[in-house]
Every structure is written in C-alpha cells, then in structure tokens.
Amino acid sequence: MARSTHQPTAPTGSSVVSGVDVAVGASALALGAAVRMVRRASALLEPVGRAAMRPPGAPARLQPALWAEAVGDIGSRRRTSIRRELIRRLDSLVPALLAEVLKRAHLTDMVLRYVDLDEVVAGVDLDSAAARLDVDSVVRRADVDAVVDRVDV
C-alpha cells in the first residue's frame, strides 16, 4: 500500500467529528480494496459470464442476454421517464423554494457584505448607459427655480 503524504488536520475538538473521519477513512480503504478485487475477478470471470449469457447452441429466445437486454431497455425507458418527471417537478419547486429563501435571506445585506460593488461598477459601460438617458425628460422634471436660487451671483 502506498504511503500517504496527507498531513493530519488540526484537532476539531469534537469526538463525533473524529469518529466520522475514522468511519469515512475506513470506508474509503474498504471500498478501494473491494474495487481492486472486483476488477481482478471480472477479468477472470468475463469469459465465463459471456458464455453463460449467450450459451452456444441455445435458441436466441432462451439466451439470458436477450432477457437482460429487454429488462435493460425497460429500465432505460423508466429511468428516462423518472428523469423527465423529476425535472418537471424541480422546475416548479426550485423557483418557489428560492423565493421563500430569498424572502428570509435579507439579500441586500448579503450583497453589501459579500459583493465587491466597486468591481461591479468598474465593469459597467457608463458611456453606453449615459447614451440611453433621456436628458430632455430629466431637465423637464428639474426644479429650475431651486437651481437658480442656489447660484451665487
């Protein structure tokens, strides 16, 4: 077995977390060993399995491979149907769930805390935005008397 170069992480102070880490590590080692065994066994047993699935001399309708293919086709169609139904349900559930989360998330506070607004504004094409302004409309709404009152003559 190869020697690990992984350095242990600092203790978390929780025996539960340490226990989970041990269980995950042991599971990973056992799974790795099982995968290696299955790969070796499958290489040895593959010719036997091929002969068992398509026995020589047996009529096509009695060959297990034919049955397996038929069951596989049924499974494939069912999986596709389940996937479509899951997508359909998620398409209606996710927006509703997201709306409920966002109601409670105080999104403005999060944007102010986590978004670099200077970086966002730096990426804005201000010339393009200014070109779309309706300056005449802005001037019509301006209080010209208040502007004149502020001018120091």
Image (tube, rainbow, N blue to C red):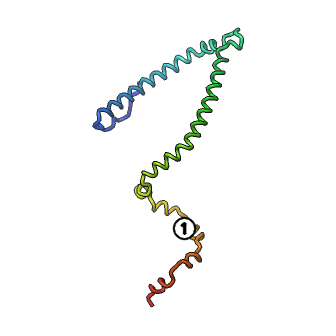
Between 16 and 106, the one nearer to me in the picture = 106
The residue pinned by badge 1 equals 126
Q: In this view, which residue lies farthest toward the top?
A: 57
* Mark 1 Cα-neighbour bin, 10 Å: few <14, some 14–19, many ≥20: few
The residue lying furthest to the bottom in this view is 153
Identity of the residue furthest to the left in this view: 13
The residue type indicated by label 1 comes to Leu
Q: Quadrant of residue 61?
A: top right
User: What x and y, as percent, mark residue 140?
Assistant: 56, 79
Q: At 53% from the left edge and 43% from the top edge, which residue is drawn?
A: 93
| Left or right position of 35 against 48 | left
Camera-side residue of 39 and 88: 88
Q: Position of residue 76 (x, y in %)?
A: 63, 28
Q: Dividing the picture into quarters, in which one does residue 43 lie?
A: top right
Q: Residue 137: where, in percent of width, then height?
A: 58, 75
Question: Residue 1: percent from the left, percent from the top?
Answer: 41, 24
Viewer-proximal residue, 24 or 103? 103
Q: Is residue 61 above or below residue 95?
A: above
Give left or right: position of 90 versus 102.
right
**Identity of the residue drawn at 35% across and 31% down:** 20
